[in-house]
Amino acid sequence: MKLQLVFDEQPRSTVRTNAPVEMVRALNNQGLKVDILFDEATHLSQSMKFSKAEKLLKTLLLLKPNDVDGLILLIKVLVAQKKWAEALSLTEEAKQKSISVPDSVSEFVQKGNERELKRSEIEKKKIIHNERAQLHQLKRELKRIRKEKNLLVEENNRFAIEIKNWIRASAIISGAALFLLIFIVDQLNTNSSKTITTNSVAITKTNNDTITPTVNKNIEDTGSNQEKLPENNTPQTENNTTQTEKNTREPEPQSAPPPAEPIATEPTIKSEDPNNSFYVVQPGDTLDKIAERFYGRKSKWRIIAEHNNVDPRRLKVGTKLEIPPKP
């Protein structure tokens, strides 16, 4: 049921004056005329100026508390402004003062207050529901954010582990490649040194095979000449001596001079010890390197130098050195 307020009150006089001025004049001259306030409030309420009417009616009730019409009009003005609690309070106060308020007005205020309370309760429930819905939504959003954060953390950890594995694999591959390269270079150096040693030994054997017969032949020739000299027991004259020297010099053109030169110039033909080996000096070689190669120590270079009677500072490429056994 919809209720409707009707402002059907009639002014108490037909003359309208300015109430505040009239009140001042009445207070100064003849006393206060409060009915003028009721008339002014009636006109204001009918003009929908409830706020001004409320002020005038409250002043009226302050000056004349038992004015029932003013009280009823004030209740209607408050209801018009939806001030249900205040209107209900005035109704309860009027009942306590035994002021007869129409039942329609009292019932209207009571129902309006209940309706306002219900609406307030509904609004409150709506607000609570909206707040709970927003709270649930925030919780869901928070769960989603936490889940995404956990996924990101797991993915980050996985990437970190993969990066570490890649770094380790790269280090292992690099180390293996470096080790293989060093191994290949070492093998190449070993093969080249073996090739050089083999070539040197071959050259040494070839030279030894070619030089040894010549040395033996020269030694045999020298020995035969020395054996012939003691057989002449008779005294010899200077002519015989000269003749002997000529005889000993005559075979020299018949012998091969080139093989005889190594006996006087090359220091390699000093011994026929089969334990000795020979080495041909290569570019970049020094006596300490040769000593380290054959003896394992660079400090043994003096043995090779003294045995071959060579100057270590003037070691020529192609020089053939006899290497004594390791002391």
Image: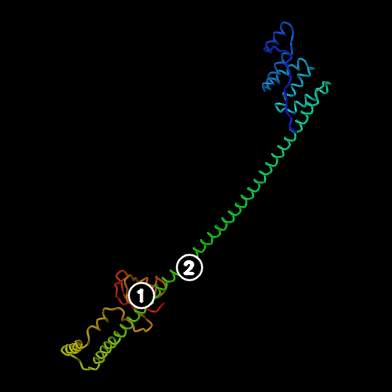
Q: Nearer the viewer, residue 162 or 237?
A: 162
Residue 140: x and y, percent? 65, 48
Give the quarter of the image for residue 275: bottom left
Residue 35: x and y, percent? 74, 13
> Which quadrant does the N terminus fall into?
top right
- The mark that comes first in sequence, 2 or 1, is 2
Q: Residue at x 31, y 83 (%)?
A: 206
Q: Tell me if 66 is positioned left or right of 55 in this view.
A: right
The dot on residue 210 is none
Circle 1 sits on which residue? 304
**Neighbour tally class for label 2: few under 14, some 14-19, many 20 plus, Cα within 10 Å:** few
Q: Residue at x 75, y 26 (%)?
A: 87
Q: Give the amino acid at mark 2.
A: Ala
Residue 249: x and y, percent? 19, 87
Q: Nearer the viewer, residue 106 or 323?
A: 106
Give the quarter of the image for residue 247: bottom left
Mark 2: secondary structure: helix
Residue 292: x and y, percent? 40, 72
Q: Nearer the viewer, residue 210 or 270?
A: 210
**Neighbour tally class for label 1: few under 14, some 14-19, many 20 plus, Cα within 10 Å:** some
Circle 2 sits on which residue? 176
Mark 1: secondary structure: helix
Q: Give the amino acid at mark 1.
A: Ile
Work out which residue is located at the far top of the displayed protein and give it: 29
